[in-house]
Image (spheres, rainbow, N blue to C red):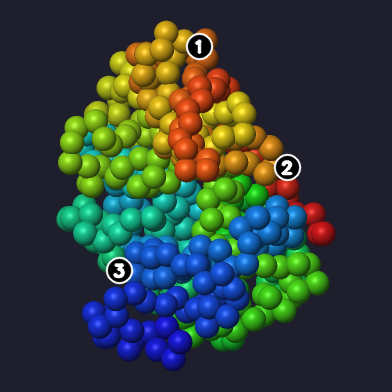
Amino acid sequence: MSGIEPATLSKEHHRQVALKTPFHPRTSELNELNLWHRWRDYTVSDAYFSTALEYTALRNSTAVFDASPLTKHLITGPDALLFLNRLMTRDVAKVRPKRVAYSVWCDEDGQVIDDGTLFHISDGVYRLCSQERQANWLHRAAFGFDVAISEETHQVAALAVQGPTSATVLIKAGFDVSALKPFELNEFTFEAHKIQISRTGFTGDLGYEVFCPNPVALKLWDQLFSAGESYGIKPMGTHALEIARLEAGFVQAGVDFLPADHAIRAGRSRSPFELDLGRLVDFDKPFFNGRAALKAQADCGYPRQLLRLKVKGNKIAKDAYLYNERREHIGSVTSATWSPMLKQSIALASVNRELWSRSEHVIAEIYYQKELQWSRVNVSCEVIDGPFFDPPRRKQTPPARV
């Protein structure tokens, strides 16, 4: 991206196999390990110097993640609210201006197409951020509505500024976020450009997400890192973020569930209830995509259930098969890691509700390799409700100045 103006980028996009984010001149300098992966059109850092130390910065000071490849859709127009309320399972009318809402949207069978965050920037102006590209689906669903939909992924840069000192760093950098409550956003002026800062994130910690036009991205990065130098600010890659999102108990598209429009075989996609996201389904509002199918599930039950597991022992239960006490195969692990905060192996899993009840233990069959030899262990798992890690600072307003 270095040296390429947004207008040029849009014209030359087809000539580049992988793009560089607006922050690449800084992230590439800091990536001592030279570890990268492809996120949609862009290359992003997996780790800069040490996953363990980047995670430590997140939980003890401030960590900054380049979230620019996040797919961003701008939705505006007189029917923007009506359209979004028709599309999403939750009641978008309750999302006031300057608020952010986590939501899902489904196909006609009540299966999740994707999840994401909806930013109500101002009356009739929304930004929808998601893991997957949704432009085609949004345009098809918008038939008959007076709305304008545009993807602004390549024009808007994004940083996740997360950790216990994140508010302090942002305030020192000139952005007073002290009054922002969780899932609120505000607009600031930076270098004569408007930027939005929301109190949101994918880490389960105190944190903020900053959206800015590409031309001021590098100046914003420099100002944040200058302000955070004495607070131990560090860049963070996807490996550390993965540990954090699992500790928060967050699901991820393409990992913990297959988007409905990607599924080929029956039974591979999931409904909001099967992802423990039933709280996001509002049957009090008018018709929305998948309402009839979801109402049937709410009344009659659904086949699978998401579990959050504390796994006994020190082995990571990656892709482990799960069994009930009768040794019946009930499901499998979708995500797993070692939690530095809990000093515990943790996992997210999907299980068959007909073969497992809450009163039963879950047994994980874990395969691991050591010195070129594969071994198998069967360990018990504890099912927990809610996130594995949920510090009070995440909700405290104003945040503690550290």
Residue at mark 1: 360
Q: Residue at x 46, y 58 (%)?
A: 120
Please say if the residues under marks 3 and 2 sit with CB atoms less than 8 Å apart: no
Q: Considering depth in this image, is 92 or 43 the residue closer to the camera?
A: 43
**On the picture, is 42 further left or further right than 401?**
left
Say which quarter of the image contains residue 236: bottom right
Task: Give the vertical position of 328 relative to 270 (above or below).
Answer: above
**On the picture, is 145 further left or further right than 245?**
left
**On the picture, is 373 further left or further right than 355?**
right
Within-10-Å neighbours for mark 2: few <14, some 14–19, many 20+:
few
Residue at mark 2: 392
Q: Residue at x 32, y 34 (%)?
A: 270
Q: Considering depth in this image, is 140 or 112 the residue closer to the camera?
A: 112
Q: Considering depth in this image, is 32 or 289 the residue closer to the camera?
A: 32
The amino acid sitting under disc 2 is Pro
Q: CA distance from mark 1 to mark 3?
A: 49 Å
Secondary structure beneath dot 1 equals: loop
Residue 124 x %, y %: 39, 62
Residue 213 x %, y %: 48, 78
Task: Give the vertical position of 114 relative to 172 (above or below).
Answer: above
Q: CA distance from mark 3 to mark 2?
A: 37 Å
Q: Quadrant of the N terminus?
A: bottom left
Q: Residue at x 69, y 42 (%)?
A: 341
Secondary structure beneath dot 2 equals: helix
Secondary structure beneath dot 3 equals: strand
Res 390 seen here:
no
Please say if the residues under marks 1 and 3 sit with CB atoms less than 8 Å apart: no
Pick whichever of labels 1 and 3 is earlier in the sequence: 3
Question: Which-is-in-front pick, marks 2 and 1?
Answer: 1
